[in-house]
Image (cartoon, rainbow, N blue to C red):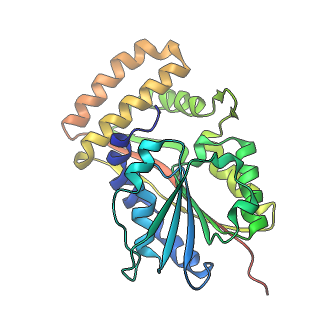
Amino acid sequence: MSKAAPEWLALREEADAAARAVELLDPLRGCLPDGPLVVRDLGCGTGANLRWLAPRLPGPQRWILHDHDADLLACATARTVNTADGTPVTTHIDHSDLARLRAADLAGTSLVTGSALLDLLSQEDIESLADACVTAGCPALFTVSVVGRVELLPADPMDAKIRDAFNDHQRRAVAGRGRLLGPDAPSVTAAAFLSRGWRVLSGPSRWHLGAGQTALTTRWLREWCEAAVEQRPDLTADVGDYLPRRLRACAAGRLRVTVHHVDLLARGRTPS
């Protein structure tokens, strides 16, 4: 996908909210401390994670919003958000590189969270993040992480080729960052926390896109195909035929798309 832009994040916010694994909320609440919460939202974008999660947790809450994009941070702090008991959330911004987050940075933090984040990280990033959370004793909730599975109905022989090329594109090497994990990120993240003695709970978080999400489906289709062709230029001609057909079906309300994601909650073991 291209660099996150406010309009793309706004398009996907409703689908993300509908997809989230609400069954992780009770275990999450059970591992949070009593009293005021301090939440660090990594790669916060326009604040969708804040707007969804904060009203489902007790107050008072202070959210520290991490992102490298100042424009997105401005969007994230523009709206007032209330906690489950009606207390307004206070927000602070942090431009620091989340890949350099250390245990000392998490002192006093109740929860680390991030949405649609893990696929943008490398193995080194994940190991460092798991180290920081475990050492600080800070639970982590990562939501709406892609797993590389997509289903389109009606099916087309090109679906699998584009999916595989897109997944490979997500695993590309980035200068100064190493190789991104893409759809492998959730399993790598779970393994990182498990290897450090923590428990990991997971729940599916699927986008179900149909006639009511034409704008999102159209944008997703275009960028899905664009990334596939960037990874495999030999698919250019086939995608040139495939994409218009799929867009016509989408516009007519005949296309259904399921994009599979997963939510992960990592937390320390409760003493027996």
Q: Where 202 sits versus 222, above or below?
A: below
Q: Residue at x 55, y 75 (%)?
A: 37
216 left or right, relative to 203: left
Q: Residue at x 29, y 23 (%)?
A: 244
Q: Where 20 sits versus 58, above or below?
A: above
181 left or right, relative to 144: right
* Residue 182 seen in this snapshot: yes
Residues 10 and 261: in front is 10
Q: Residue at x 30, y 30 (%)?
A: 246
> Residue 54: where, in percent of width, then height?
44, 70
User: Which of the image's four quarters has the C terminus?
Assistant: bottom right
Q: Where 45 sits versus 77, above or below?
A: above
> Residue 195: where, in percent of width, then height?
81, 60
* Residue 157 seen in this snapshot: no
Dividing the picture into quadrants, the one containing residue 193 is: bottom right
66 left or right, relative to 81: right
Q: Where 200 sits versus 192, above or below?
A: below
16 left or right, relative to 136: left
> Residue 218: where, in percent of width, then height?
30, 35
Q: Residue at x 51, y 43 (%)?
A: 149
Dividing the picture into quadrants, the one containing residue 111 is: bottom right
Label count reads: 0
> Residue 152: where, in percent of width, then height?
38, 40
